[in-house]
């Protein structure tokens, strides 16, 4: 037996000492060297996915409150899972939630292992500042300036809702985060419609909250179909507004009783119903008004023509929607294809047109834009429209877009600052999974949130009621949840 194996190199003592010293120097340099500064774009929103769990950093329960816990959740790309890096200088950043506008904060300015990550209004304090330390595979660790500790998923959990806390920087996979840019204004995925039951088949829904409680929906169809609900979830058919027909509309519909895209409102102790009369692909169209003391089927009285369009016009008088401005004035937006979305003034005492002025709000140069609705919130008027192809069943490409203005008559711009008159619009809901062509939306304020109501198509081509809630991110732009 020899003293050394033939497979082991012959290392003399001096050479061995040299190797050991070199290795020690490399180790010392690696321990002493600061982490490389990872690069982020301060104008980009990111989803932060934990390397260990594969789940996204998330504002728990979509809260907007100071002190709300930061946790992890299965990735859905909602605004509560989107973050941007606000530059604090010298390689330090504050991590801002798109949902709330607040920043990640180590609770109580603690320096202890296990202190919770929460959101808080942006004060710029050191416990709200982080540097990005590079980790293998392009991931980063988020090191707090105040404590020197890293944000991690507590106790290596893989569960939805597990808290994000700080701990001494170990470099573990539960302290590593991958940054995925999210296209501005367009989540990579959308939520499904909220729960609805009962008679939910319809097209072009418009809704009013009844003074005594509950909801009344009008939609496209023979005589303007009606539905009611006590709780915004279970819906019941309630006949039609005009079971005896609308002979005054026959010249626009070629005698059909099929009426389109109603708008419904309650004021002055009565219900107002505006509705469209036309034929598919034509702009020989009209919007009429009826009123009712109860909103019930057969109780509606014809009040007259509001606005009409002719083949020689560059607009189409369908898809009416009412907005009451901050001064109490009534305005009606309408339009489909042609030169786009228009607006006229209404007389609040009658619901009929007041004056002759037209305002142009949005256009795609003759392309597919229609179904406007304007909702006032947060000091803005938000103009929602539907782009692209409706009424093709599962092949529909309808999608819901939005722009905003500080004036009801515009100009409206999208998130990127593109005027809606130049084809602009920020998408907030499109086809996803088994939901095809969501559109012809309406928005209203309820006790729990602003509500988005629309129709969508199933794979079989059925048109159903969709309802979701709307939130507003830190920049005041709406998103669907």
Image: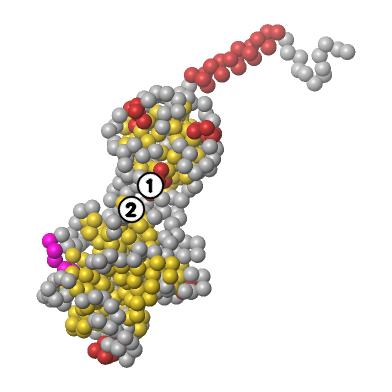
Query: Where residue 203 sits: x, y (%)?
Result: 38, 74
| Image height of 109 relative to 24, above or below | below
Q: Which residues are magenta?
A: 327-331
Q: Which mark is residue 398?
A: none
Q: Which mark is residue 471?
A: 2
For the residue pair 183 and 247, the one nearer the viewer reads as 247
Counting residues from the N terminus, which is met first, the one under dot 2 or under dot 1? 1
Q: CA distance from mark 2 to mark 1?
A: 9 Å
| Image height of 166 relative to 193, above or below | above
| Image height of 49 relative to 226, above or below | above
Q: Quadrant of residue 478?
A: bottom left
The answer to whether residue 313 shows anywhere in this view is: no
| Image height of 187 relative to 70, above or below | below
User: Image point 47% across, 74% down: which residue?
Assistant: 462
Residue 206 in magenta stretch: no
Describe residue 478's horizontal placement relative to residue 188 as left or right.
left
User: Image point 25% across, 81% down: which residue?
Assistant: 299
Query: Where residue 321 sits: x, y (%)?
Result: 25, 70
State the quadrant of the N terminus: top right
Callout 2 touching callout 1 (CB < 8 Å): yes
Residue placed farthest to the top in the image?
Answer: 14
Q: Which mark is residue 62?
A: 1
Describe residue 197's horizontal placement relative to residue 328 as left or right.
right
Q: Quadrant of residue 34?
A: top left
What crowding class fits label 1: few (fewer than 14 Cα within 10 Å), some (14-19), or many (20 or more)?
some
User: Image point 38% across, 73% down: which residue?
Assistant: 236
Query: Where residue 157 sits: x, y (%)?
Result: 53, 37
What crowding class fits label 2: few (fewer than 14 Cα within 10 Å), some (14-19), or many (20 or more)?
many
User: Image point 30% across, 89% down: which residue?
Assistant: 244
State the quadrant of the C terminus: bottom left
Q: Main secondary structure of the magenta part?
A: loop
């Amino acid at each position: 037996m020899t003293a050394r194996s033939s497979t082991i190199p012959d290392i003399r003592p001096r050479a061995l000492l040299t190797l050991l010293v070199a290795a020690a120097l490399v180790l010392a340099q690696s321990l002493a060297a600061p982490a490389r500064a990872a690069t982020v774009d301060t104008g980009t929103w990111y989803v932060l996915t934990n390397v260990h769990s594969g789940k996204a950093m998330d504002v728990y329960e979509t809260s907007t409150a100071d002190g709300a816990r930061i946790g992890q959740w299965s990735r859905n790309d909602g605004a509560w899972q989107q973050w941007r890096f606000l530059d604090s200088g010298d390689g330090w950043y504050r991590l801002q939630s798109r949902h709330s506008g607040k920043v990640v904060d180590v609770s109580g300015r603690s320096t202890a292992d296990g202190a919770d990550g929460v959101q808080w209004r942006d004060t710029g304090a050191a416990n709200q500042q982080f540097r990005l330390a590079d980790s293998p595979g392009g991931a980063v660790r988020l090191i707090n300036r105040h404590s020197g500790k890293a944000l991690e998923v507590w106790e290596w959990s893989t569960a939805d809702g597990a808290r994000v806390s700080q701990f001494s920087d170990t470099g573990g996979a539960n302290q590593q985060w991958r940054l995925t840019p999210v296209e501005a204004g367009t989540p990579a995925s959308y939520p499904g419609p909220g729960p609805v039951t009962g008679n939910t088949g319809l097209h072009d829904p418009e809704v009013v909250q009844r003074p005594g409680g509950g909801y009344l929906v009008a939609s496209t169809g023979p005589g303007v179909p009606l539905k009611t609900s006590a709780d915004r979830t279970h819906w019941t058919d309630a006949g039609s507004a005009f079971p005896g027909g609308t002979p005054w509309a026959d010249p626009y519909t070629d005698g059909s009783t099929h009426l389109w895209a109603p708008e419904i409102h309650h004021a002055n102790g009565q219900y107002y119903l505006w509705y469209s009369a036309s034929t598919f692909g034509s702009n020989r169209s009209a919007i009429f008004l009826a009123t009712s003391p109860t909103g019930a089927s057969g109780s509606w009285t014809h009040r007259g023509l509001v606005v009409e369009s002719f083949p020689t016009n560059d607009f189409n008088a369908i898809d009416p929607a009412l907005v009451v401005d901050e001064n109490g004035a009534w305005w009606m937006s309408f339009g489909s294809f042609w030169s786009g979305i228009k607006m006229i003034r209404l007389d609040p005492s009658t619901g009929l047109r007041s004056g002759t002025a037209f305002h142009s709000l949005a256009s795609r140069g003759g392309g597919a834009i229609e179904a406007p609705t304007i909702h006032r919130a947060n000091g803005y008027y938000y103009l929602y429209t539907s782009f692209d192809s409706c009424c093709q069943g599962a092949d529909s490409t309808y999608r819901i877009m939005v722009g905003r203005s500080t004036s009801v008559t515009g100009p409206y711009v999208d998130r990127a600052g593109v005027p809606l008159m130049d084809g602009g619009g920020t998408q907030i809901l499109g086809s996803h999974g088994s939901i095809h062509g969501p559109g012809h939306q309406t928005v209203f304020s309820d006790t729990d949130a602003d509500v988005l109501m629309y129709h969508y198509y199933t794979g079989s081509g059925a048109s159903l009621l969709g309802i979701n809630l709307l939130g507003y991110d830190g920049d005041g732009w709406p998103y669907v949840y």
